Amino acid sequence: GAGVSQSPRYKVAKRGQDVALRCDPISGHVSLFWYQQALGQGPEFLTYFQNEAQLDKSGLPSDRFFAERPEGSVSTLKIQRTQQEDSAVYLCASSLLGAVNQPQHFGDGTRLSIL
Amino acid sequence: TQLLEQSPQFLSIQEGENLTVYCNSSSVFSSLQWYRQEPGEGPVLLVTVVTGGEVKKLKRLTFQFGDARKDSSLHITAAQPGDTGLYLCAGEVSSNTGKLIFGQGTTLQVKP
């Protein structure tokens, strides 16, 4: 399909394990965003890339969270030493340009459960 | 910190009723977007409003941006069960990144 693809759709991990979440944006989209969404709540901004440059990581909750987009396309969100409060849906979105009025296209998210 | 207060958080109505969802902030946004999200899926953009006082209509949905660009509303006329879902407002905080600040969401249930 031509939309934003996220994998895995579901991830269960034990507390303390490291996890990696993948996002394949729409081809040609310059901007890529990661959001965290708790159940029944609105998404919260985590980080933003323009091509391979991470221009804003102000929303990352702690230094256990790390994101990269080395070739300006696929992005990976890594969480080290996971804790129960990390359980949430992690959404990725991409847009053609990082500019006003550019619609963001969201993937269906990765639901992360930490036991 | 820029916050968007969305109300009500939950709304359960009968088919055919009208409803309004509000999104308020003390901050000015360059644009405001409304999304609808189904369970297990990502948010889908419904509309973007940019100009203060702007009104946009999408079939039975009417969106309004406040004159000062700090608040917005979504009005649904004659709600149908297919309108059930999570409605999210999101303000664009910067004109050169597209970073969005989301409200808490309104869970709408329309009963047949």
Image: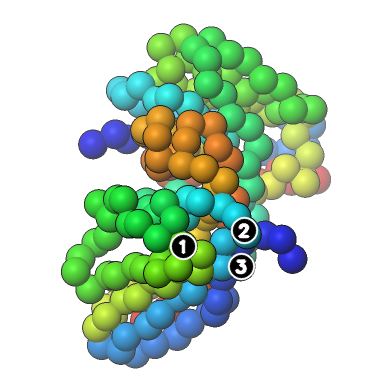
Inspect the image, locate mark 1, and give the three-letter code of the amino acid beneath it: Gly
* Eye-nearest disc, 2 or 1: 1
Question: Judging from the image, what secondary structure is the residue with disc 1 in?
Answer: loop
The C terminus of chain A lies in which quarter of the figure?
bottom left
Seen at 46% across and 9% down, the residue is B67
Identify the residue under disc 2.
A26
Dot 3: within a 10 Å radius of its alpha carbon, few (fewer than 14), some, or many (20 or more) residues? many
Q: Hey, what amino acid is under mark 3? A: Ser
Mark 3 or mark 1, which has the lower sequence index?
Answer: 3
Q: Amino acid at mark 2?
A: Ile
Q: For mark 1, what is the residue?
A: A72
Please report the residue visible at 23 percent of the width from the left and 36 percent of the height from the top.
Answer: B1
x, y percent for residue A47: 35, 56
Q: Are marks 3 and 2 in contact (CB under 8 Å)?
A: no
Tell me if A54 is positioned left or right of B68 in this view: left
Chain for disc number 2: A
Q: Is residue B17 left or right of residue A61?
A: right
> Are both tags, 3 and 1, on one chain?
yes
User: How far is the residue under mark 2 from the one under mark 1?
Assistant: 12 Å
Q: Residue at x 23, y 73 (%)?
A: A64
User: Could you tell me residue B49's position as x and y percent?
Assistant: 56, 24
Give the SS element for disc 2.
Answer: loop
What residue is at 71 percent from the left and 61 percent from the top?
A2
**Mark 3 — on which chain does it sit?**
A
Front residue of B73 and B8 = B73
Of the numbered discs in the image, which one, if any, rests on residue A5? 3
The CA span between labels 3 and 2 is 8 Å
Choose the circle earlier in sequence order: 3 or 2. 3
Q: Is A88 placed above or below A79 here?
A: above
Q: Where residue A72 sits: x, y (%)?
A: 46, 62
Residue A44 at what x, y percent from top left? 38, 51
